[in-house]
Amino acid sequence: MFEEGKNADKAVAKAQGFSSDFQQAGDAGRAVSAEEWQAVDKLLMSAAGGPVPAEGFKVLIDHTVCGGDSAWPSEKSFPMLDLLRLAVLGSNFSEVCREAGSSPGGVLQGLLSTGKGEGCHKNTRMLALRVMCNCFKHAADSEVMAVLNGPETITWVLECLATGDKNTKVS
C-alpha cells in the first residue's frame, strides 16, 4: 500500500489479537470477521495515493470512531486507528466516508471525540491526532476543513501538546 504503511502488518497482527480476545470473551459484536479482514487487506493493497475500497474503510471506522457498540475501547483501538491513518490518505476519502455510512466531518468528529474521551489511552490519542493530520491532504473538502480548523480541534491539539507524552507531542 502506501509508503507510510510498510509496517502495517504489525498493526494488523495486533488488531487481530485484540479481535480474537473479543471473540473469546463472547463480545462478537466487536470481533472482526474473516470477511472484514479480507476487506481490510484489500484496502491495504491499494495503490499509494489512489482510491481505497469503501468496505475496508467501513470496517476501520466501525471499530474505531463510528461504530457504536462495535467500537473498540480506547486501550485496544490504537492498531485499528493506525490502519485508518493510512486509509485516509486515499484519494477518495470523502466518497468512502459517505459509502461507509458517515461523512468526512462525521469521521473527523468521531476521531476528535475518541481522542478527547475521558480516560483515552495515550496511544489512541496519539493515533487519533495522526489520522486527523493525514486528513489535511483533503483540505479542498470544506467539511474536512471545517472540523480541522474548528475551535474544538484547535483546543484539543493544544491540550495534546501540553501532555507529557513525547509521542503525542511529535504527532
Image (cartoon, helix red, strand yellow):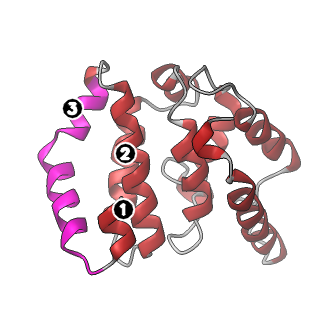
**Front in this rendered view, residue 167 or 77:** 167
The percent position of residue 147, horizontal first and vertical second, equals: 24, 38
Q: In percent of the image, x 57 and y 23: which residue is there?
A: 99
CB under 8 Å between callouts 2 and 1? Answer: yes
Magenta segment, which residues? 143-164
In the image: residue 103, left or right of residue 20? left
**Secondary structure type for disc 2:** helix
Q: Amino acid at mark 1?
A: Gly
In the picture of the structure, the residue carrying the numbered disc 2 is: 132
Residue 24, image x, y percentages: 84, 75
Q: Is residue 150 magenta?
A: yes
**Which badge, 1 or 3, is on the more N-terminal residue?**
1
Q: Which mark is residue 115?
A: 1
Is the residue under label 3 in contact with that under label 1 (CB below 8 Å)?
no
Residue 88 image position (x, y, % from top left): 50, 35
Marks 1 and 3, how far apart in space? 18 Å
Q: Which is nearer the eye, 130 or 28?
A: 130
Q: Above or below — where is 162 with respect to 145?
A: below
